[in-house]
Image: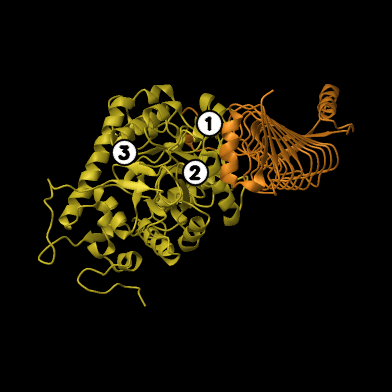
Chain colours: A orange, B yellow
Amino acid sequence: MASIGVMDASEMTTRELNALLKKASKTEDLIEITNPGARHNIVVGILDECHIKINGSVGYYSASLLDGPTVDIDGNAGWALGENLMTGRINVSGDVGASVGASMRGGDLFVGGDAGARAGISMKGGTLLVTGNTGFLTGFMMQKGRIVVCGDVGDAVGDSMYEGIIYVGGEYGSLGSDAEVAEIDEDELLDLWSLLDSNGVKSKPDFKKIISSKRLYHFDSLERLELASV
Amino acid sequence: MTNPKSYIFPQRTIDDIHAKADLGRYRIRGFSTSQNVTHFDDLTFLSTGLTRFPLEGYKERCNTKTIIGSRYASTPLSLDTPIYISGMSYGALSANAKTALGRAAAMTGTASCTGDGGMLQSERDASEKLIYQVLPSRYGLNPKHMVQAQAIEIVVGQGAKPGTGGMLMGVKVLDEIAEMRDLPQGIDQRSPARHPDWLGPDDLAMKIEQLREATDWRIPIHVKLGACRVDDDVKLAAKAGADAVVVDSMVAGTGASAEVLLDHSGIPTVPAIVMAREALRDIGLYGTVSLIASGGIRSGADVAKALALGADAVAIGIASLVALNCNREIEGSDFVNEIGVPAGECSHCHTGKCPVGITTQDPKLTKRLDPKSGAERVANFLNAMTMELSLLTRSLGKGNVHSLEPEDLAALTLEASAMARVPLVGTNKVFGEL
């Protein structure tokens, strides 16, 4: 397997690091980054399949605007990890800040620790799996996809969500506007446990399922010309 | 005996109360504000006489070349005219309209802009220069499309509805449009007002850096603001690292907005430009951060006045749609029967029943707009505006449209003098100055 070896982030600017990564992502299978120093905007806009390992914590917008790569982060991450992920996979071993997986449209995002507020906000596809807890407004304005939180979730979960499903293994603070709890069937539960198992999570939480009530899909009344046919 | 005419309760207000009493909600419409506010018509140019001489109005060279975003971008946006087509979504507009606008921009050496909802491939194919919007909704945002763009515009607010997100009624959220936006078919889409991944100006600085990293610091990053607290907002956007700031005023158009926002929020274009100019000057970035104005630009005269007040470029929305035959009876259309009002009075973009095929997704109606002839009409209009701009510039003795300055203007009203910070005609006094 080809490898570019190790990139020491402390020896280059963010711009140099990302430029080198983009170049390497076209030819290399495995790229390793050391000393990330919790810097923002590391691993941004990589649009090729490759495997990137980051040894340490990263700042805001790490592993964002990606389409293809697998990114392993051994540490914590700041806000908006995995923002607008299209395809590929992101694994972070520790905790992440707010807005993890914001607007992600596909792929898989795994958080080994806790996540902050607005986890999976405006999510449009893919799977966000958090083994710990998440903060308030988890799944805010979610459109599609699946959020799985093994621990507890803060207030206003699923507020204004359109579609998609939020699974909560622990307790939630409160339901958001237009969100409701739905029945979960056995096959769904087995599927979730299988997902956890494949991600190395051995617990089998008794998940609650939260979906949209769909009461905010339409205006309650329309003027004559606003009707589909007049 | 008839009732005396009431200025507080004219017929329009009575009708409005009746409608809300029927509906139980705010009303929605498209087009532009109905407020009569200070605008470019309240300013006039002081052309040459004995103190300075004119250039030949119809012949001598007048430079209209416009460069936007050279602060950090290695490839700034280079336009042949300081007028480009504003962001209007595929969804609000038909595919034929978007394609026509992209083609018209390419024909005149300028740019068009995606709007909300992602990039329409036929607009990309037709455009040479396409500005890619990053909005709070992130509908259809695709990094592979973003890297094809010639500039990025982060939308913080929109002049027609500052402080809120976009709106698209269910009649338009169908098929490809619902799919591109990842929305259920037929929902009344009310887009987010806040970005999902950043909140304040310090976060915005990091967001801008992210977009630069994604595009290799190649293309300019614009920040579009609904013109309200212009002084603070422009300074914060510039400090966050924007290459260009777009101030979109209260008279700017929309395909759909709550009427209460259209008419009762934001400030007009004239003071928005002046405040933005002074804000950039205050922090030493005027001339470094490009200033783009939008809202109610209808003619070359409006463009010239915007540039004289301090803008580097302008963006047009409704005017480009009017050039596409908005509010004009064409072969096959029947405004009164189809939309309930005569051509010239239509502001019903949100209903999806546009009789001329612009703001609709109904295949029967979209057929009425031929993208090729539509593009020619818009290109003609852009060329006419640029000629008007050049003519006025030469009449002021200048050979470059970017040499226009406030000193070239006078105000026709006290209010315009105070807002534009230029003297009232017949005086040497700028009203409102301490």
* Image disc number at residue B144: 1
Which circle's residue, 1 or 3, is located before the other in the chain? 1
Q: Chain of mark 2?
A: B
**Kind of residue sitting beneath label 3:** Val
Q: Nearer the viewer, residue B137 or B310?
A: B310
Q: At x 26% / y 33%, what residue is drawn?
A: B377
Q: Is residue B271 left or right of residue B299?
A: right
Foreground label between 3 and 2: 2
Q: Chain of mark 1?
A: B
Disc 1 secondary structure class:
helix
Measured Cα–Cα span from mark 3 to mark 2: 36 Å
How far across and down, in percent of the image, does residue B105 sit? Answer: 33, 36
Tag 1 near tag 2, CB within 8 Å? no
Q: Nearer the viewer, residue B345 or A10?
A: A10
**Quadrant (top left, top right, bottom left, bottom right) of the N terminus of chain B:** bottom left
Q: Is residue A120 above or below residue A187?
A: below
How far across and down, in percent of the image, does residue B268 sit? Answer: 39, 57
Residue position for label 2: B217
Q: Inspect this view and state whether residue B328 appears.
A: no
Q: Residues within 10 Å of mark 3 (few under 14, many from 20)?
A: some
Q: Residues within 10 Å of mark 2 (few under 14, many from 20)?
A: some
Q: Quadrant of residue B381?
A: top left
Which circle's residue, 3 or 2, is located before the other in the chain? 2
**Quadrant (top left, top right, bottom left, bottom right) of the C terminus of chain B:** bottom left
Which circle's residue, 1 or 2, is located before the other in the chain? 1
Disc 2 secondary structure class:
loop
Foreground label between 1 and 2: 2
Q: Quadrant of residue A171?
A: top right
* Image disc number at residue B322: 3
How far across and down, in percent of the image, does residue B289 sit? Answer: 42, 55
